Amino acid sequence: MFMRKCLCLFSTLTIASMALANDGPGLGVEATDAQVAAWDISIAPDGEGLPAGSGTAAQGEAIYAIRCSACHGKAGSGTPNNRLVGGHGTLNGPAPVKTIGSYWPYATTVFDYIRRAMPYPFSASLTDEEVYAVTAYLLFLNEIIKEDDVMDARTLPQVQMPNRDNFVLAYPRNPDN
Amino acid sequence: MIESKSKNAAPETVAGNGLLHRRIFLTRGAALLGAGSLGLLTPTLAVAQVAPEMPVLAKVPGAALSGYGNRSVFEEGIKRYNIRTYPGTTGSGGSWTPLESLEGIITPSALHFERHHSGIPDINPDVHRLLIHGLVDRPLIFSMDALSRYPMVSRIQFIECSGNSRVGTAPKPVQMTAGGLHGLFSCSEWTGVPLSILLEEAGVDPKAGWLLAEGADSAAMARSVPMAKAMDDALIALYQNGERLRPSNGYPMRLFLPGYEGNMSVKWLRRIKVTSGPTMTRDETAEYTDTRPDGSSLMFTFPMEVKSVITAPSFGRNLQGAGLYEISGMAWSGAGKIARVDVSVDGGQTWGQAALSEPVLSKAVTRFRVAWQWNGGPAVIMSRAVDDSGAVQPNRAQFLAARGLKRNYHYNAIQSWKVAANGEVSNVYA
């Protein structure tokens, strides 16, 4: 009996000292799965986080014309804001033209960015289907996928971006220093 | 007797063209004070020094007390400038800190540089929450009230946009003030909760190598951060220079990553997702990557490297006749403390060491000063910082030879100012 009490006290002390080691009052409130699902909008390069739905370039063309072209020009040609199409083969010249097609290493980033930040000034106003479609359209304009290729959670991460292998990781060590 | 001895003592020069020993302003002992009364050390200032007939003294009561102070109306011309926004937007762009108008090491919060990707959100702290989830034992939500009960730390540290000073790659030197050229850079006292405490509370999975930090602005600005940095010195910053963060600096909370490129210190922080690898957001792939001469690009160039700029004299702060001047400037490094700053007033032919004003803090602005007896002839002045890792600030030719012209980020070459015989200061490549 005495022994059990001792063990109890010991384990209580252990837990207390572990909490102290954390240095915080432990006031975080555990989030539910539903809360996390509602907040979590990011897409990993392996496709983790991509939602249900799908789209093609043909569907995306009409959405782009209405929601995107005022800033990014006809068919992603740019002006007044970022050019999204073309520039292939310019990176090793004196004036690189960096677009989704010539520069971006991951197709998942196109979906992630459009969904979180576009179209200005009404971000997050496109449905997931529309984001898939516009993503497909921009990849098609850059001659990376075919016009009738369906982009969805399975196919988008498989798209090979032309400049993918042209990046060198500088973390943890910068090879230029 | 002592006085007449001092009259004959020339101030000690340490480099060509009149650069004086760094102690000349610091050890104002009897000998130097004596020398200071001489023509040699007295600046022949053309500034307004004429004494009025009567002393200036208010004869009527002054302004009332106020709940929140303002600066003098005579200082209202000092503002952030070069405010640039993307076409069709109002809040997406940047504004630059007027470095040449500041002294010491702290940037007033109202003059802290800005770089926003979709404007400044108006966030009610009572409803704002931070979610930490992903590869953790327990996903946790923190309110502002909860965070306010955590132990906090305060640090004086700089934040610099990695695109700062990129104008230095222009073919011809652009004529702008020190702040216009280098003012995507500010230094504040930041107070907040170490991120490591919150991550430990959530219980980080051993497989976790990175985290994604995401803002509550309408661009949901997001960057991946190595777990090692998060556990080292990352802060959930709640206060800036003693008061709650300014909205333009992430109110009510921002991530603060000392020494790392500013874009990663995500403002209006709402979510941290612990991940195995980087998320590859737009800002860390399409932007904030460094294209090399061969067309390949470096990704994850996080630390801001050793750098300095002379703010007095500088473009717009012209000299007013030959005489004694203090050269003053800022030096900083994302790697640690500033170990030394050398100054040249002959275009880099000879260098003398500047005095470092206390405090000299890690990943903070260090103010440096050195005395210069300007003879009234043309001069090119420059500063070269060295940090305590041994890294030396390169000159422009060295920087371009090593890294090429295609980089938009991490330009840290030496700034050169030309002083013309009439005292006018201009930006030059030297």
Image (cartoon, rainbow, N blue to C red):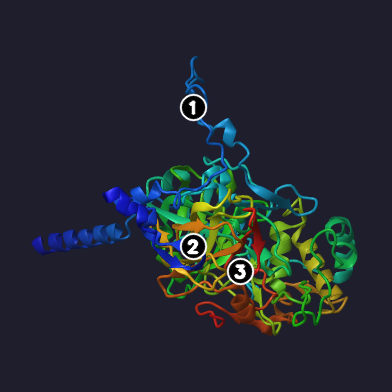
As drawn, B167 above or below B59? below
Task: Pinpoint the chain carrying mark 1.
Answer: B
Nearest to the eye among marks 2 and 1: give it: 2
Is mark 2 in CB contact (under 8 Å) with mark 1?
Answer: no
Q: Quadrant of the C terminus of chain B?
A: bottom right
| Residue lying at the far left of the rendered structure | A2
Camera-side residue of B295 and A28: B295
Camera-side residue of B23 and B211: B23
Residue indicated by mark 3: B411
Q: How many marks?
A: 3
As drawn, B81 above or below A83? above
Q: Residue at x 67, y 67 (%)?
A: B282
Q: Quadrant of residue A118?
A: bottom right
Mark 3: give few (<14), some (14-19) or many (20+) Cα within 10 Å: many
Between the residue at mark 3 and the residue at mark 2, the CA separation in whole angstroms equals 30 Å
Residue A141 visible in the shown view: yes
- Amino acid type for the residue under numbered disc 3: Tyr
Is mark 3 in CB contact (under 8 Å) with mark 1?
Answer: no
As drawn, B160 above or below B54? below
